[in-house]
Amino acid sequence: MTLAQVVYQLSTDSEFAARMQTDPEAALAERDLQLSKEEQAFLIHGLRRGTRSSGRTISMQEVASLATGWR
Amino acid sequence: MEISDLEERIEQTQARLRITIESTLAKSEVSAEYQTMILKTLPLVSTEKYSDKNERWLLLPELCHIACGGEEAVADPISAAWYLFYVAAFLMDHAEDSLEGIDQITPISAGKMINIASGQFFLANLILADFLQAEPISAARANIVKAFQTQLLRMCDGQNLDLITSNYTLRKYYEIIHQKSGTFFSLACWSGARLATQQDEIINAYAEFGKHLGVLIQVLDDLEDWRELQSGNGKLESTKYQRILPALYTAEVIPSEKRRRFQQIIEELSTGNEEGLLEEYMDIIEKAGAGLYMLTIMMREYDSARLAITDIHPDNQADKMLLSMIGSLLDY
């Protein structure tokens, strides 16, 4: 489950998170992490939408508030 | 595409499906009492609300059918059968897990609930049998009726896997939700499309749309559990502390010493001991970055569903409604 591992590193390592925002392929290669092109695209999309100006990644509460149309 | 357009279509479709379901049931020669019990649990034919599940999904076969060139109302038997299976599965889930929620509105014992759900399964099959025998005989209809049986069996297999799995992992979670929710929603879309066309590429695109929609719905269901926990009002079923997606993600990624503590907390929570542990449980999940993981997965399923059908029939109104339905799930 590499996608999960990459998300964990993004959430716990701000340097890696910043590198992923600018050069994702190099950032992944430096950590010896592999994602398919598709996964990489979804992750970058998620990272851009889920990173606050303070650099903090999106919380569970914030994610839950996105799913307002459910039920 | 406005939500009000969707609501109007849901109402129109509900009215037609009501006729299909009630007329098939009336021909079945079962007692009036049992007919009433079966119908009362279907939100679409009752003013009593037994289920909090959204009714919009009953449009899936019809919209996929129309998007592929089919005519309005032709897919009604498929929609009616699929919807009956949907409600029956919901009842069976409640009977299996607990009767809380439904009990608050009208007390029904687990035994009665299983019997009503069984009636709905057979009623759905009766509707499919009539659909199969309608003139002129068609290969598409035979394909669809067979697909209902094979795919619903596959879904039951997924439910069995869910029930017998003790070592739940992230990988197992995806395997199970693809087999259950993914298969079921894919069936709705595949069968609607299949009734209108023989072009595999197009049919598979709608099946793919349904599969990702089903997975997204399951992920959102887990998010709803989280929201209830966070509100302070909620308490999860004992197995769910381990099995909701943010917890499975966390268990997968955190270092082993933290994982041992996390598993200890889950075991305690599962036995009903929440003394100070719920906050710690939620804190570990939050700090592991589960928010970003959930967002990424939701976007993956949402985008995959959307992309599956985006270029199939540009500017088609039914496609727009399908996209609007999935878009209405997420405020993003």
Image: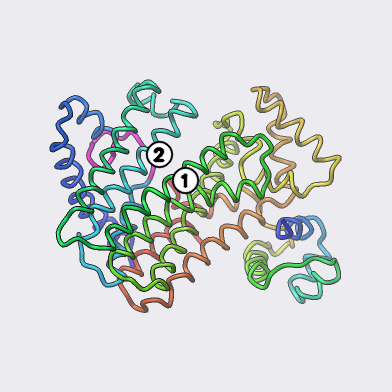
Q: Earlier in the sequence, mark 1 or mark 2?
A: 2
| Image spot of residue B173 (x, y percent) | 61, 46
Badge 1 and badge 2 in a common chain: yes
The structure's colour scheme is rainbow
Q: How many marks?
A: 2
Label 2 resides on the chain identified as: B
Instruction: Kindly state the secondary structure of the residue where label 2 is placed.
Output: helix
- Name the front one of labels 1 and 2: 1
Tell me the residue that label 2 is attached to: B89
- Above-or-below relation of B263 to B295: above
Residue B195's mark? none
Q: Residue at x 37, y 46 (%)?
A: B54
- Above-or-below relation of B186 to B81: below
Three-letter amino acid code at the position of disc 1: Met
Instruction: Kindly state the secondary structure of the residue where label 1 is placed.
Output: helix
Three-letter amino acid code at the position of disc 2: Ala
Quarter of the picture containing the N terminus of chain B is bottom left
Tell me the residue that label 1 is attached to: B155
Q: Residue at x 57, y 32 (%)?
A: B236
Q: Is residue B65 left or right of residue B275?
A: left
Q: Residue at x 75, y 34 (%)?
A: B263
| Image spot of residue B212 (x, y percent) | 50, 59
Q: Is residue B291 left or right of residue B163?
A: right
> Marks 2 and 1: in contact by CB < 8 Å?
yes
For the residue pair B58 and B84, the one nearer the viewer reads as B84
Q: Main SS type for the magenta part? A: loop
| Label 1 packing within 10 angstroms: few (<14), some (14-19), many (20+) | many
Res B126 → quadrant: top left
Query: Which segment is the magenta one?
Result: B42-53
- Above-or-below relation of B12 to B162: below
| Image spot of residue A66 (x, y percent) | 53, 55
